[in-house]
Amino acid sequence: SELLANPHVLAKLRAELDRVVGIDRWVEHSDIPHLPYLQAVVKETFRKHPALPLLVPRMSSQATHVGGYLIPKGARLFVNAWAIGHDLEVWKDPEVFLPERFLQQEADPVDVKGHHFKLLPFGAGKRMCPGMNLEMAIVHLTLATLVHSLEWDLTPGQKSIDMSDKMALVYHHVHALLVRTSKARLQK
C-alpha cells in the first residue's frame, strides 16, 4: 500500500532491485543483504504499520521507577508499538513514509531485533516473537519478488489509495487494497 501511495519510493526500490539483481533472473535470498533500500522499506513499514499495535503483555517482576512513575511488582504492562512508531519525540515526521530515515543511521543502525526500543515489531527480550527470523526472510523475499517481477498500478478509475487503518488485535486497512499488474517485468 505504501509503495503504491508513494510512487517515488517504489521507483527507487525497483531501481535498486534492477541494479543488484538484474532483469534476467528472480530475486534470491542471497540478494537481500545487498539491498539496503529494500531493508529500509521493510523497517519503515514495520514502524508505521506494526502488525500488532499492542505487543504481548508483560508483567513486572519487581517494583521499579520508569520515567518518574512507580511500576509495582506484578503490574501488567502493555507496550504500544504503534504509538512509539508515531511519536514526534522519537521520529521526525512520523506520518511520512520515509525509508531513507533508516539509511541515515550509519553509527547505530536501528534493527528490528529488540535492541532499539524505538522499533519493536517483534517485541524484545525473552518474549520476543520466535518466528522473527522466518518472517523477516519471507517479508523481504516476497516484497522484493513482487516489486521486481511485476508492474503494479491502481485499478481503473482509482485515483489514490485509502490508507486509513483500523486498530484491533491486529492492525489492518479499513478498505481492502485493490491493485492490478499490467505486465511481467522479468525478461526470462
Image (cartoon, rainbow, N blue to C red):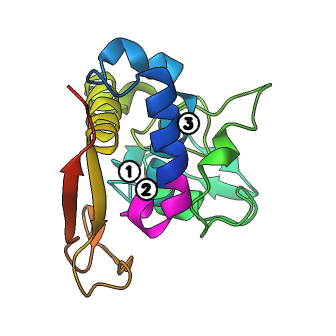
Q: Which of labels 3 and 2 is toward the front?
A: 3
Residue identified by numbered label 1: 55
Residue 134 vs 121, above or below: the answer is above
From the viewer's side, name the closer residue of 33 and 79.
Answer: 33
CB contact under 8 Å: marks 1 and 2: yes
Q: Residue furthest front?
A: 187
Mark number for residue 17? none
Find the magenta span and give its range: 1-9
Q: Residue at x 51, y 27 (%)?
A: 19
Q: Residue at x 26, y 80 (%)?
A: 174
Decide which of tag 1 and tag 3 comes sooner along the chain: 3
Q: Residue at x 51, y 18 (%)?
A: 34
Q: CA distance from mark 1 to mark 3?
A: 27 Å
CB contact under 8 Å: marks 3 and 2: no
Residue identified by numbered label 3: 37
Q: Which of labels 1 and 3 is toward the front?
A: 3
Secondary structure, mark 2, is: loop
Residue identified by numbered label 2: 78
Q: Residue at x 40, y 24 (%)?
A: 22
Secondary structure, mark 3, is: helix
Please name the amino acid that badge 1 sits on.
Answer: Leu
Q: CA distance from mark 3 to mark 2?
A: 31 Å
